[in-house]
Amino acid sequence: MNADIRVLDDPAQEAAQLLAAASGQLALTGGSTPKAAYELAAELRQDWSGVDFWFTDDRCVPPDHEHSNFGMADRALLSRAEGATVHRMRGELGPDEGAAAYEAELDEFGLDVLDLTLLGVGPDAHICSLFPGDAALAERERRVVGVETPGMAPLVSRITLTLPVVNASVQIVFLVTGEDKAEAVRRVFAGPPDPDAPGSLVEGNVMALLDPAAAARL
């Protein structure tokens, strides 16, 4: 992958600054490091007029559930992002109906291209809820699909954007921290494109914000 790789002591701060400076259509992801970035972004900017927040993926749980990516992002940022429009994946509908509803919302708002997509990387090198070897990786027609059985815990059905949507983004930003992600980071950024490492299939205008531990094997 051809990526602008930046190794930083505090990559969440850098991601927060990118979010706070952005406009247009932004896709958020789940995870503890993004949560820190969202909390910082909320401090950096109060008026989010002109921003639509979307999600890369979410679990099929109610929005107030502990496993909800929306719930985390709402507490960290969205509830304080005055003027923003938020597009929640309705996980409580289940993977298939929830995916269809989100795809319909993308169509309703005429969204063709995301301006900024924030991604994490799992220890298995997955992105969004696109897991190694899953059939969803090969989807090229639909923009949103349901994932009945995820590749790692929590074993809750998911809704996810597909690779064509991610790769069409104007800017793609990976935010990854921790020694436990170092091997996955190597596979994504230093290895060949491989369906067993879904992050390696991302292409386009890619920036990677890593801490030294996550970048240790590059």
Image (cartoon, helix red, strand yellow):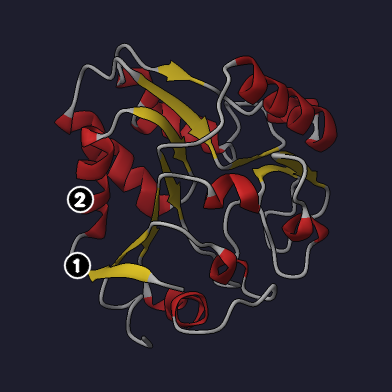
In the picture, residue 176 is in which quadrant?
A: bottom left
Q: Of callouts 2 and 1, which one flags the residue occurring earlier in the amino acid sequence?
A: 1
- The amino acid type, in three-letter code, at marker 1 is Leu
Real-space CA distance between mark 2 and mark 1, rounded to the nearest whole angstrom = 9 Å
Image check: 44 left or right of 175?
left
In the image, residue 12 lies at what x, y percent?
26, 53
Q: Nearer the viewer, residue 111 or 100?
A: 111
Q: Residue at x 79, y 37 (%)?
A: 95
Residue found at the far top of this picture = 83
Image check: 105 left or right of 70?
right
In the picture, residue 151 is in which quadrant?
A: bottom right
In the image, residue 16 lies at what x, y percent?
24, 43
Q: Is residue 202 above or below residue 193?
A: above
Q: Is residue 93 above or below residue 141?
A: above
- In which quadrant will I find the C terminus? bottom left
Q: SS for tag 2?
A: helix
Image check: 147 left or right of 183?
right
- The amino acid type, in three-letter code, at marker 2 is Gln
Q: Residue at x 32, y 11 (%)?
A: 83
Q: Nearer the viewer, residue 159 or 77?
A: 159
Q: Residue at x 74, y 23 (%)?
A: 101
In the image, residue 29 lies at what x, y percent?
48, 44
- Are the two marked residues, 2 and 1, in contact with CB atoms closer than 8 angstroms? yes
Q: Nearer the viewer, residue 138 or 74?
A: 138
Residue at the spot of label 2 = 13
Q: Where residue 18 is drawn, which disc sits there?
A: none
Q: How many marks?
A: 2
Q: Is residue 164 above or below residue 87?
A: below
Q: SS for tag 1?
A: loop
Residue at the spot of label 1 = 8
